Image (spheres, rainbow, N blue to C red):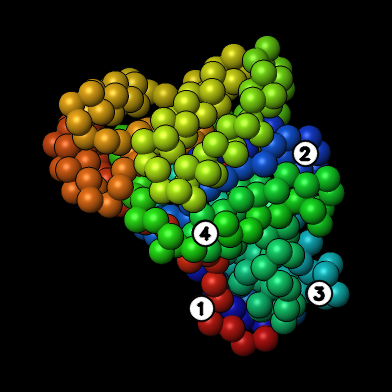
Amino acid sequence: MRAVAAAPSNIAFVKYWGNLDPALRLPYNASLSMTLSAATTRTEVVFDPALDADEIVIDGRPAAPEAAARASAHLDLIRARAGHGHRARVASANSFPMGTGIASSASAFAALTVAACAATGLALDERSLSALARRGSGSAARSIPDGFVLWHSGADDESSYAESIAPPEHWDLCDVVAIVSREHKAVGSGGGHGAAPSSPFFAARQHRLPERLEAIREALLAKDFERFGAAVEAESYELHAIAMTSRPPLLYWTPATVALLHLVARWRAEGLSAFATLDAGPNVHVLCEARRAQDVVAALESLDSVESVLVNRAAPGARVVEAQS
Ligand code: PMV
């Protein structure tokens, strides 16, 4: 009853922000993303009949109570499907800092779902794994499939899942993440999803999103970087406008974030084609085509405010690495 899984994080091009059904994590809108090659979580799950409680270790330390409770609640869903009540020993390691806008909950819950299902011998197809991962963290649904991924918002538990719309090799798009802070954010995405509908602009964003998603999907499939990047950057600003104008207001940006946003716009004016997008955190994801990645990395690494840089390509989704059921 042991398995190890690895799962990538993902960057959303059309973002998920707000739950129609918070208990099931059914989102208000469909979203679109790319799995990330350099931001992964590796998780080992061992179900052990001798344990009285789950033991959850993240990056070598016992998980904080809230994170441990969330992981246990997710394991409960898997135990219920598998029809046993064994507690588990879970050890999870991230290749990148958690809680800083690189969607660590996406890779974490995708890896936990795949490892726990494999450890109990539950053979679920990709769609069911994606829907199940969603229950742990919405964006985790998009870390199950490969490459470029669409999460159908759906109307119920089964119909809200993600699937690949293009394999990783479809496009040599790069997401160069500029890490400006390793501090864990004060308000996680859970608070943001809850507050989102209180923004006076929430309904306007929702109204625009189907057309926006279609435009981004078409540009992605056509590999039209200029059209794609401009629409993705605009969508990111709209999400942050909702966050900033919700009650309570959420401002994820730091001065270093703002400086980078200005810089990316200046690069464009100077002929370096790159666009910025941000999740619920201060780190800036700079999107560019692979042929410009070295220029972007060099420019970011020359800045004092940038602690480190992660270069991501599209990657395969979550995978079982080892299993003994
Ligand atoms: O899956 P969550 O609850 O961590 O929410 C993710 C929210 C954003 O990263 C801001 C957007 C997205 O779609 O990934």
Query: Would residue 171 appear left or right of 236 to someone viewing this image?
Result: left
Sequence order check, earlier mark of 1 and 2: 2
Q: CA distance from mark 3 to mark 1?
A: 20 Å
Task: Using a 10 Å C-alpha cutoff, classify the residue at mark 3 as few (fewer than 14 neighbours), some (14 to 19) or many (20 or more).
Answer: some
At 85% across and 75% down in the image, what residue appears?
83
Task: Using a 10 Å C-alpha cutoff, classify the residue at mark 1 as few (fewer than 14 neighbours), some (14 to 19) or many (20 or more).
Answer: some
Q: CA distance from mark 4 to mark 3?
A: 32 Å
Instruction: Specify the amino acid type for callout 4.
Output: Ala
Q: Secondary structure at mark 1?
A: strand
At 67% across and 83% down in the image, what residue appears?
1
At 65% across and 15% down in the image, what residue appears?
201
Which residue position holds label 1? 321
Q: CA distance from mark 2 to mark 3?
A: 24 Å
Asked whether disc 4 touches disc 2, contact meaning CB atoms under 8 Å apart, the reply is: no
Q: Secondary structure at mark 2?
A: loop
- Please name which of the two marks, 4 or 2, marks the residue nearer to the observer: 4
- Please name which of the two marks, 4 or 1, marks the residue nearer to the observer: 4
Sequence order check, earlier mark of 4 and 1: 4
Q: CA distance from mark 4 to mark 2?
A: 29 Å
In this view of the protein, can residue 95 be seen by the observer? no
Instruction: Specify the amino acid type for callout 2.
Output: Pro
Q: Secondary structure at mark 4?
A: strand
Instruction: Point out which mark residue 166 bears.
Output: 4
Sequence order check, earlier mark of 4 and 3: 3
Q: Is mark 2 within 8 Å of ligand 1?
A: no
Which residue position holds label 2? 22
- Please name which of the two marks, 4 or 3, marks the residue nearer to the observer: 4
Instruction: Specify the amino acid type for callout 3.
Output: Ala
Q: Is mark 1 within 8 Å of ligand 1?
A: no
